């Protein structure tokens, strides 16, 4: 009859006749033959090699597998078992028939002793104490000369001399009680050997897939060892999910996540199960992703477990659904597609809420555009000025300016005053010459302009006070000034050419006012220059040159079109521009960095400046030194060996790790460099 043996598990390899066992006892169980089988396949057993190994009659025809349940059927008839047992008895007798067993047959066991073979056929015991204590002596001295202290000691007194003169140690015994009767040296150490070579340990590292088992392979070399490390790629923390390539808007199933477009760059929604692949309830977490009051609620990262590669999205909203949530996304970056049933890590970084608006800055700064408005009667050209230029003010048609002298002549003329045509005077027509007697009440002062004026008649040679409206002929000059009780109107004057207009209008006794010369208008004020539209102040320019507007200066006129800093940044498209002195800003863009060329080094020292660029490179064409700078930061430096590449010496670095430099032409190296508060670190990675 046959009985199956099934204890333990086995590993088989396709095309290999060796079967290994775990937890098996094939030889101890007395198996000598039979049939081996796994998963419905069976092959005869050729030999039982040990408790954990058998050889089958032909290479395993199935697939490679480990930890598999198995069976071995073997013949249990009396004849078959008798033959098997006799084979085992013969094997055990052969093992017992040895000189080693014969040597220890007569040894009497002693407590705390070990067996010691004294020849090929003899043995004895040796105490553990003698092995622990080492050499047996009475006293130890450092030199042979120091042994003389014990010259008079009795026979069998033993002295250990640490250095007999040639570097060796030896024990000397007193042969008799006679002084200095010492035995020959019994050396306990040999002569010093030659100095050994300094061992060299070289180490390299290679990245393995995330989740792989770390490896370390040690290979002996002529002067040391070489160690090759296999380090799994880092796996980020996150919730476990699995990708589904289905794109329909529906519950993807427990532990699954899908997009509404297979091309992730075109996806606008992700459909995420409310249960993670590990079975965790995720509804509360997923719905909380939309709590930030920013338009972008945060950043969602999906990391592929097998190789650590990622795809990221901006989350703009989350909608609840039965068994899943709909995550609105934009701004895809990274992987553009994910295969079906790929394991992922789900990570989300919440965006912060908007902070309190900052206060407005001081009312001063750089003016990028200057414009001007002028009162009725004036025209402005060249406004606004955004870089350089000239503001030109001219009189509009029907208006003109006056000099101070001309303005004095017109003082007292009432608005709207007219001079009508006269056809007769005192009953006479034609060219008339009036005498003082022709007009009743006309005094000598009026007709001759001499003497003292009367109560109602002005004297032109002295100051007069005018209470009524007076009309003067053109170009009247007031040399002593004039005080106007009801204002002063000026008529218009047309310049004879583009360069002859010279008019000045100023406050009496001051230099404050308008000065028009050629095509230039100067407006002089004791404080601010103020412009009004009717009774409303619309603009002012202070004596310090600062301009204040009632409204805003449009962007097309060189302004910002805003009254606050925040609104100005928004209008200028700068509200999302990163600030150099602000921490923890959410950056969703990127930068393409051009590596800085450091040239070709043939000698000297290259002192690294990490602040130059994050990517730098140079050519090694001669022996030189590479040292860290003092600028905190980090960067990558690529080195390419030229035809005359020399040895690179690294000095000044707190820690140096990685591969050794070579001088082989064409070899390349990538240097990971960092300088910080704790010191400087250089990691060298050979790229071949």
Image (spheres, helix red, strand yellow):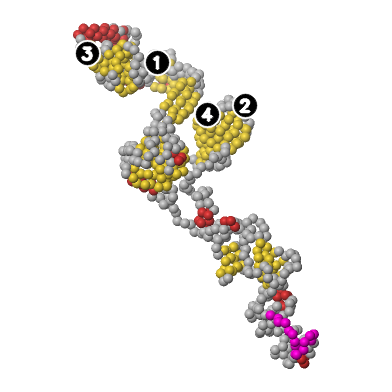
Q: In which quarter of the image is the N terminus?
A: top left
Is there CB contact under 8 Å for labels 3 and 2? no
Q: Position of residue 316 (x, y in %)?
A: 42, 47
Nearer to us: label 1 or label 3: 3
The residue carrying mark 4 is 686
Q: Distance between the residues labelled 4 and 2?
A: 18 Å
Q: Distance between the residues labelled 2 and 1?
A: 74 Å
The numbered mark, 1 or 3, whose residue comes first in the sequence reads: 3
Q: Distance between the residues labelled 3 and 4?
A: 63 Å
Mark number for residue 174? 1
Drawn side of residue 232 relative to residue 421, left or right: left
Q: Using the image, determine if residue 661 lies above or below residue 283.
A: above
Drawn side of residue 673 relative to residue 387, left or right: left
Residue 596 within the magenta-colored segment of the rendering: no
Mark number for residue 549? none
The numbered mark, 3 or 2, whose residue comes first in the sequence reads: 3
Q: How far apart are marks 3 and 2 (CA)?
A: 76 Å
Drawn side of residue 148 relative to residue 115, left or right: right
Quadrant in the picture for residue 174: top left
The residue carrying mark 3 is 2
Mark number for residue 643? 2
């Amino acid at each position: 009859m046959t009985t199956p043996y099934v204890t333990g598990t086995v590993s088989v390899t396709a095309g290999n006749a060796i079967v290994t066992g775990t937890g098996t006892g094939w030889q101890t169980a007395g198996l000598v033959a039979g049939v081996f089988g796994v998963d419905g396949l069976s092959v005869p057993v050729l030999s039982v090699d040990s408790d954990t190994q058998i050889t089958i009659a032909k290479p395993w025809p199935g697939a490679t597998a480990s930890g598999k349940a198995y069976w071995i059927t073997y013949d249990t008839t009396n004849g078959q078992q008798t033959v098997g047992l006799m084979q085992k008895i013969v094997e055990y007798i052969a093992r017992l028939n040895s000189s080693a067993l014969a040597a220890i047959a007569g040894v009497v066991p002693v407590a705390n002793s070990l067996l010691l073979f004294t020849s090929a056929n003899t043995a004895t015991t040796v105490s553990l104490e003698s092995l622990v204590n080492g050499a047996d002596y009475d006293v130890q001295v450092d030199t042979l000369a120091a042994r003389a202290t014990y010259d008079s000691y009795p026979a069998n007194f033993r002295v250990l001399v640490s250095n007999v003169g040639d570097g060796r140690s030896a024990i000397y015994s007193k042969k008799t009680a006679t002084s200095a009767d010492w035995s020959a040296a019994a050396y306990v150490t040999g002569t010093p050997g030659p100095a050994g070579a300094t061992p060299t340990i070289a180490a390299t590292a290679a990245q393995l897939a995330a989740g792989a088992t770390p490896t370390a392979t040690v290979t002996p070399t002529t002067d040391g060892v070489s160690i090759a490390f296999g380090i799994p790629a880092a796996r980020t923390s996150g919730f476990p999910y699995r990708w589904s390539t289905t794109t329909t808007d529906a519950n993807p199933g427990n532990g699954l996540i899908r997009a509404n477009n297979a091309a992730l760059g075109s996806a606008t929604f992700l459909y995420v199960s409310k249960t993670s692949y590990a079975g965790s309830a995720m509804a509360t977490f997923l719905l909380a992703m939309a709590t930030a009051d920013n338009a972008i609620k945060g950043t969602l990262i999906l990391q592929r477990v097998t190789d650590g590669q990622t795809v990221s999205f901006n989350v703009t909203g989350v909608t609840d659904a039965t068994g899943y949530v709909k995550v609105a996304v934009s701004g895809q970056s990274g992987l553009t597609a994910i295969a079906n049933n790929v394991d992922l890590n789900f990570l989300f970084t919440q965006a912060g809420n908007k902070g309190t608006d900052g206060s407005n800055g001081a009312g001063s700064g750089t003016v990028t555009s200057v414009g001007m408005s002028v009162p009725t009667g004036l025209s402005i050209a060249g406004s606004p000025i955004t870089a350089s230029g000239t503001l030109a003010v001219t009189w509009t048609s029907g208006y003109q300016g006056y000099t101070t002298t001309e303005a004095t002549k017109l003082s007292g003329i009432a608005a709207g005053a007219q001079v009508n045509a006269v056809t007769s005077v005192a009953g006479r027509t034609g060219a008339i010459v009036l005498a003082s007697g022709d007009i009743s009440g006309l005094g000598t002062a009026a007709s001759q302009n001499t003497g003292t004026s009367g109560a109602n008649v002005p004297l032109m040679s002295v100051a007069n006070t005018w209470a009524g409206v007076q009309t003067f002929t053109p170009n009247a000059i007031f040399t002593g000034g004039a005080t106007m009780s009801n204002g002063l109107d000026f008529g218009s004057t047309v310049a004879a050419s583009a360069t002859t207009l010279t008019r000045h209008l100023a406050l009496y006794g001051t230099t404050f006012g308008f000065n028009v010369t050629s095509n230039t208008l100067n407006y002089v004020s004791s404080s601010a220059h103020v412009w009004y539209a009717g009774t409303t102040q619309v603009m002012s320019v202070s004596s310090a040159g600062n301009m204040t507007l009632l409204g805003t200066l449009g962007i097309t006129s060189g302004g910002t079109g805003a009254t606050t800093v925040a609104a100005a940044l928004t209008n200028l498209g700068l509200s999302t521009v990163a600030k150099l002195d602000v921490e923890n800003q959410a950056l969703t863009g990127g930068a393409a960095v051009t590596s800085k060329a450091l040239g070709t080094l043939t000698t000297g020292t290259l002192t690294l400046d990490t602040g130059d660029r994050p990517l730098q490179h140079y050519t090694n064409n001669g022996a030189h030194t590479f040292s860290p700078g003092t600028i905190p930061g980090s960067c990558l430096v690529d080195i390419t060996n030229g035809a005359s590449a020399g040895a690179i010496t690294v000095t000044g670095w707190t820690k140096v790790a990685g591969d050794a430099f070579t001088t082989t032409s064409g070899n390349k190296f990538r240097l990971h460099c960092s300088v910080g508060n704790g010191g400087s670190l250089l990691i060298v990675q050979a790229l071949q």
